[in-house]
Image (cartoon, rainbow, N blue to C red):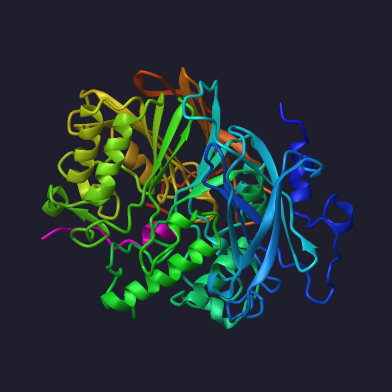
Amino acid sequence: MRNFSRRGFLTATLVAGSAAAIPGWAGSASAATGTPFTLGVASGDPTLSGVVLWTRLAPDPLAVDGRGGMPDQAVPVEWQVAKDEGFTRVVREGVARATPERGHSVHVELEGLRPGREYFYRFRAGGEISQVGRTKTAPPPGADLSSLAFAFVSCQNWYEGFYTAYRHLAQEDLDVVFHLGDYLYEYGVGATGGVRGVRLPEQYLKETFTLTEYRNRHALYRTDPDLQAAHAMFPWMVTVDDHDVENNWAKDISQIDKEPDQDREVFLQRRAAAFQAYYEHLPLRRSSMPWGPDMRLYRRATFGRLASFSVLDTRQYRDDQPCGDGEVVGCADRLDPARTMLGAAQEEWLLHGLHRSPATWNLVAQQLLMAPLDHDASPDVQSFGMDLWDGYAAARDRLLTGMVEREVRNPVVLSGDIHRSLAAELRTNFDDPNSPVMGVEFAGTSISSGRDGADQDRLGQTFLAANPHLKFHNVQRGYVRATATPQALTVDYRVVPYVSRPGAPVSTRASFAVEAGRPGLHQTADNPPVGVRSIPDVASELDHLAEQQPRRTAP
């Protein structure tokens, strides 16, 4: 049991403490400038001896020049780490420099902490003290853990819904959180901020292209108190998907001809701006600091002998989507064995690491649905979305077959992007429903993208009918909570009934268990929601799917 009140600590993280009331640090608030910690605090990428601590100084977070109200000069930022939330037992402290070149963000890479321990941290700048954050180091690689609790999330469109799911996530008892992409959306937010009803400067009404615009979009998202609460409670591991730069981009290729960044060099400038703003607003290590348009995001985290997580990047190294990037009937190019989703280096890194891993559970945290997803229930027609792994079918087969050949223990794929909750069994031959199951996949829905959603829609019914390996589908918003033990992995789909207004309750829509050494899904709970509509008469209400081109037959 934790030695503090989770609800009480959560409340405390949302209020900047009085400097005079916190032991060890003295200071006073500045009524003229206000707190520079308007974007909260965060931690990430835990190891057995440390973690990254993050904040960004921004007394005026939505300033249209992208500087957050900060001067064009470096500012010293003090930091402290303690064993207790009252900071009576400080174990590490120091000073970092927040520079204008990095948007006055701070990334403190801690080392020398004890493994598998809980710590509290805070920052001070200009006489102001930040909110208190809580984090946790990873256990030693050889430790025999009895359990590990984690969650994964994705797709948090600010103007399409409130972040109520994050408020509930912050109340969970977790060791780590994974964000699988679409931390922001590059589209304009609308004159009144969509469902939020907030009027913003004109700059926010258009799509993001420049560093200033990406910085301001991140800052807008990070002002949300529920998102701040979830960041302050747990260490996160993050990776990008398409909307963090531009919808459906691939490698150095922009999405569509009409975009002003269609030229390769211009698009790479845009990608560089997006990556820099992404780094500035998230708790990433120096090894992930972007170098122009390039950013190393694939990496691995181990938690004793119980679980290993391989975090992937499915955007920077992929070939362009075949036959366009929408839903397509046919398309022989998707079966080309020369095509890649991960790039040769990342694919080899992944398979080599999985092969060498002694962990009971080997989890692959990545962006896009890996299991086939036929959009047509007709036995004579197959229709697939080319932006998913379906557009890279040979690469998927190579990866899954590689896991089997390397005898990877208990492979589990965690996915985001699709704005739906899905659970699937993985096979090396999906054309044969009787072929052995070699692993499982859990795809999580969005935090808010797609608005309120529904329990079921016609497209989901089609998915379930056309894809026998698919065992569960839901279109509500929420997150996925999981617990790994040496015996089993249990997964709960946590959903909220609406995001178009704040204050929604959370419930567990369905639960699954996977037994160690016995690949396959076992549904342990099915709780149909009360008072939540289904949508049998429309293909989809999700703008995400509307972004795709209409279904067509490949030439």
Instruction: Report x, y in % for residue 545.
Output: 37, 57
Q: Quadrant of the N terminus?
A: top right
Q: Is residue 399 left or right of residue 500?
A: left
Mark yes or no: residue 258 visible: no
- Residue at 59% over, 32% down: 116
The image shows residue 148, relative to residue 371, as above or below, that is above
- Residue at 11% over, 52% down: 332
Front-lying residue, 399 or 276: 276
Q: Quadrant of the C terminus?
A: bottom left
Instruction: Report x, y in % for residue 91.
Output: 71, 42
Front-lying residue, 519 or 114: 114
- Residue at 46% over, 77% down: 210
The residue stretch that appears in magenta: 542-555
Q: Is residue 447 magenta?
A: no
Front-lying residue, 496 or 138: 138
The image shows residue 427, relative to residue 19, as above or below, that is above
